Every structure is written in C-alpha cells, then in structure tokens.
Image (cartoon, coloured by chain):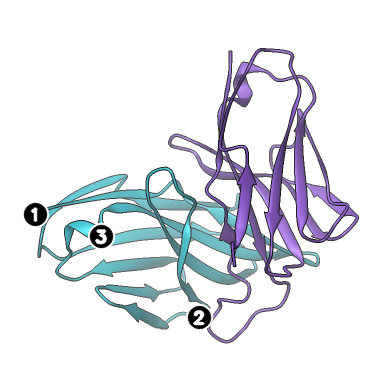
Amino acid sequence: NAGVTQTPKFRVLKTGQSMTLLCAQDMNHEYMYWYRQDPGMGLRLIHYSVGEGTTAKGEVPDGYNVSRLKKQNFLLGLESAAPSQTSVYFCASSYRTRSADGKRVAQHFGDGTRLSIL
Amino acid sequence: EDQVTQSPEALRLQEGESSSLNCSYTVSGLRGLFWYRQDPGKGPEFLFTLYSAGEEKEKERLKATLTKKESFLHITAPKPEDSATYLCAVQAQIYNFNKFYFGSGTKLNVKP
C-alpha cells in the first residue's frame, strides 16, 4: 500500500520549458490536491479535484494546469516554466466524508517534487 | 481574511523540557483543525483532528487542544526524535468542497 506517490522527486528546468508532475494514490480517495510549499509561506493550494474528470482553481493557479482523467491520478502541468515557480510541490488526497476521529477527511501527502527553474 | 498563524516560528528545547506550540486562526465556517508533522524532505504526516472547542487529543508525548480561536500542541518531555516541523491546518466548507488553510509551521529542535 504505497499511499500517495509523486514523480519525479527532483527536476531542474530552464525558463520556458514545460513539464508534467504526476501524482498517484491507491486509497480510492475522491479528492485530490496540488500544493506548493515555499519558505515562510506555508502550503498554498494550486488546483484541486473533487472527482474524476473535474478540476478547479485554488489560491495560486496562474501558470499551472491540471487533469484528472482517472480517479487515482492527478497531473500538474507547467506550460512555460518561470523562476517564480521554483518550489516544492506536494500532492495530497482525501476522502469526501469524515469519520468520527477525523482521519477519513484528513489529507494524505506525497513526499514532494523539488523543482528548480533556472 | 481567512488566516492561520503559527507561533513561534522556531523552538529549541532540551530533551525533557516541555512546551507548547500555538495555532491561531481567523477562518469562518470552521469544520475542523488538523495538526501535521513534517520531517525534512518528506510530506506532512497527519497527527490529530479537532472539531469543537474543548476537545483534546493525545498521542504519546503530544496533546492537542482547541478553543474557539486557537489550538495548542503540547509536547511533554520531548525526545530528539520529536524534532520536526509541526503544521496546523484549518478546514472550512466552501460550497461542496473541503478547503484547508495551512499555517507556515513551527520548526521544533530537541537537543539531547
């Protein structure tokens, strides 16, 4: 049972290049999220999905696109990378409904993708 | 403005020296408050959820409490393996979606 798996773990891009980050979860979670984590700023939501085939914008969506063609996968794309997108990207997933102990709605995170854009 | 603030930003303790971390929030429509632990190079790991003022949860040396405007994470007799960054997140219901507001974390360093 792997939980949430992110690939790649590290990547260096040049300004203007494009790439896709992959997130896969094996917990049958309905909700999936992409965050970026920058020093001193906490986790900020980029995009999210409440189910297969649906996506929505979070707090900082500009410069990113997402797709969720299968329930277990959530892709984050950078069409034309900029230095401001240098960050650590985390994918998370959760169930839609809560349990009494809160575990069911708590987010489960991958170990992140460290992205540097030169 | 919906906001979550954690203090202090960093905390250095000697092994066995108890202390508390604070998470204050100004989020309307609170549905739950979550504590996570994050180790270097790893994603956040779920610790506790609190839903109502007065609620308490415990796990080993950690105890989380909740009031109407803040939560505390109490660490009793910490050990070096408790060193990590502790994140607080507040869940709000936005239409039919669970939105989470994260604080920037408290970095805890426990020295032997």
Left or right relative to B28: residue B10: left
Q: In front: mark 2 or mark 3?
A: 3
Q: Name the residue under label 3.
A: B82
Residue type at numbered disc 2: Ser
The reply to the same-chain question for discs 1 and 3 is: yes
- How busy is the neighbourhood of tag 3: few (under 14 within 10 Å), some, or many (20 plus)? some
Picture coordinates of residue B97 (x, y %)? 76, 64
Q: Residue B71 occupies which quadrant of the picture?
A: bottom left
Query: Chain letter for cyan?
Result: B
In terms of secondary structure, where does tag 2 sit?
loop
Quadrant into which the C terminus of chain A falls: top right
Looking at numbered disc 1 in the image, what kind of residue is underneath it?
Answer: Pro
Q: Mark 2 points at which residue?
A: B52
- Residue positioned 57% across, 87% down in the render: A100
First in sequence, mark 2 or 1: give its number: 2
Q: Name the residue under label 1.
A: B112
Q: Front-most of B88 and A99?
A: A99
Above or below for A47 versus B33:
above
- Say which colour chain A has: purple
For the residues labelled 1 and 3, the Cα–Cα distance comes to 11 Å
Which label sits in the foreground, 2 or 1?
A: 1
Which residue is pictured at 30% across the width and 59% down the height? Answer: B21
Q: Which amino acid does label 3 sit on?
A: Asp
Q: In this view, does B102 lie above or below A64?
A: below
Q: Disc 2: which chain?
A: B
SS of the residue at dot 1? loop
Secondary structure type for disc 3: helix
Q: Which residue is drawn at 33% across and 77% down?
A: B59
Asked if both marks, 2 and 1, belong to the same chain, the answer given is yes
